Image (cartoon, rainbow, N blue to C red):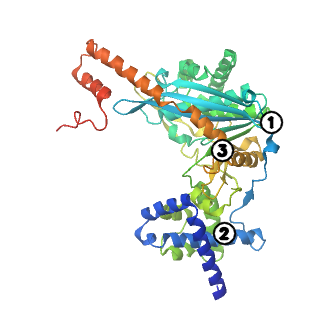
Amino acid sequence: MNSQDDQYQSLAEEKLLEDLQRQPHIMIKLSENALLVADSLRDNYFKNTAKFITHLRGAMRQAARGERPDQILSVQAINDLNWEDVQGEVVTFIDGGLGQVQMSSPVPVLLRVGSYRVKTGERSVTEREHFGYYPIILGDLEGGSKERKDFPDIIRITSELLGGLSAVKRTPDLRVLMFHGPLVYMMSGYAGHTPFTEKDIDIFLHQYAEEPGLAEQLKEEFLREAEIEIYPKIAPDRSDEWIERRLFEPLSWIAFLYRQLIKEAQKRKPNIIIAGVVERGELREFSEFILLERIFQSLRQKGNQNYFNELYGRKDIKSPKALLDKLGYTDSLLLSMLLEPGQFSEPWEIKNKYAGLTKGKIALPGESYTSDVDWTCLKPPNKIGFPKVLGCYVKVSETTEPFRVEVFDKLGKSQIIEAARRAYLYASLLPGYGFPVGLDIADKYAKIPSWLTDAYSKLIKYHLGISLQSGQVSDAQMRRLIVQSIYMTKRDWLFRPSN
């Protein structure tokens, strides 16, 4: 590199640093990372990050001009969609909220899935907007492992899916279905929950369909599929018992609901656009397996494999994973510095959602022991498995970090671009937030109001107090626990730990 190139590079780095200083969300994240990285990386963390991003932007410009054979990152503009283009489209937004009562600690008691349906361009308020919600009282359920912290999550995932499926069934002209959060969660983390009973499923399905026959049909369709294909693979030694007891293994049930959602979307022409939109995500899969993998391969081809070690003054940055581990970069952080407002990154298949689906243990309702199960058959592309999911990142403004859009691969190649364009358009109504406005509304609607949970908390404490006064609770230790649950707060000196 000659002196003129050095000067140009230095100016480019200075301009990038100025750009970053105008984007507080990036500066805050970089500042946090600078405090967490190794001491040897800390002093020049900002400067070296600016050098890396400047080089990367230069490579992207060269590829766009045809001056470079390999494409490091492909981006596309999606700010060409106008409200006139989506005039009359019916869109439903789905989100779930959890209500907790404050005893000695917060206790989740109620989940509510909110839906917000809107017809774009409709002037009549009564015709334009419609709200719905689907409540689930967690204590009414028999299945699921209530002792696990993720019990409310698996209930919420199931309820949101049924809310989405209900929206598709009830809305013949639905064009877009958008979920707040991942379209599919990291499902391996929810393996091992006690199966739901048929009574549990009836509670889930109570709000699913206006006609009870449709809910019953969905339930029987799953049990039939479970008997023939699913349970013999998941629990071959006890599959007959599972069917006889009419049990619904949570991951199998959720995977079935995803397949039903896709099947219903495919019945419409064009297919319904189904997407999940994730804000403030910590995923780094795109950076590790797509972006940085290409960069490391390009560096090796040019004999410059020590680029990152020389840049950051290290000897151990030899792979994408090592780079991310040492420097704390994530997808959203890197793409915040690479994407321009109104652009989205190239889509990729998100594979880590099902990576941990392996063999494990499960306890059936009413049993104290566990038995062997095998969830590997639920990985895509198995017929009875979860669907493949594609993802991309969308940047709305300079002051907000990109959000991730997820779609089902099976619904066609146009899903990702059409979902990204609409998510950007909806988010343009909230430029300071940079997130689809309909999801923001659904989020607020799904939240359980504090006055309701406060009242429920007082009701619980009242009944516990009556039980104590009437002598229904005689065990001394249990009485103490109940008194603590009624009266104790984090600052209560009366119930401090004793020696």
In the displayed orientation, state which residue is furthest to the top: 470
Give the tally of numbered discs.
3
**Gap between marks 2 and 3 measured at Cα:** 28 Å
Indicate which disc residue 26 carries.
none
Q: Earlier in the sequence, mark 1 or mark 2?
A: 2
**Of labels 1 and 2, the one closer to you:** 1
Q: Nearer the viewer, residue 248 or 161?
A: 161
Amino acid under disc 2: Arg
Does 87 appear above or below 286? Answer: above
Q: Tell me the quarter of the image containing the C terminus.
A: top left
Mark yes or no: residue 252 visible: no
**Gap between marks 1 and 3 measured at Cα:** 18 Å
Residue of label 3: 436
Amino acid under disc 1: Gly
Residue of label 2: 57
Amino acid under disc 3: Pro
Q: Are marks 1 and 2 in contact (CB under 8 Å)?
A: no
The secondary element bearing badge 3 is classed as loop
Residue of label 1: 88
The secondary element bearing badge 1 is classed as loop
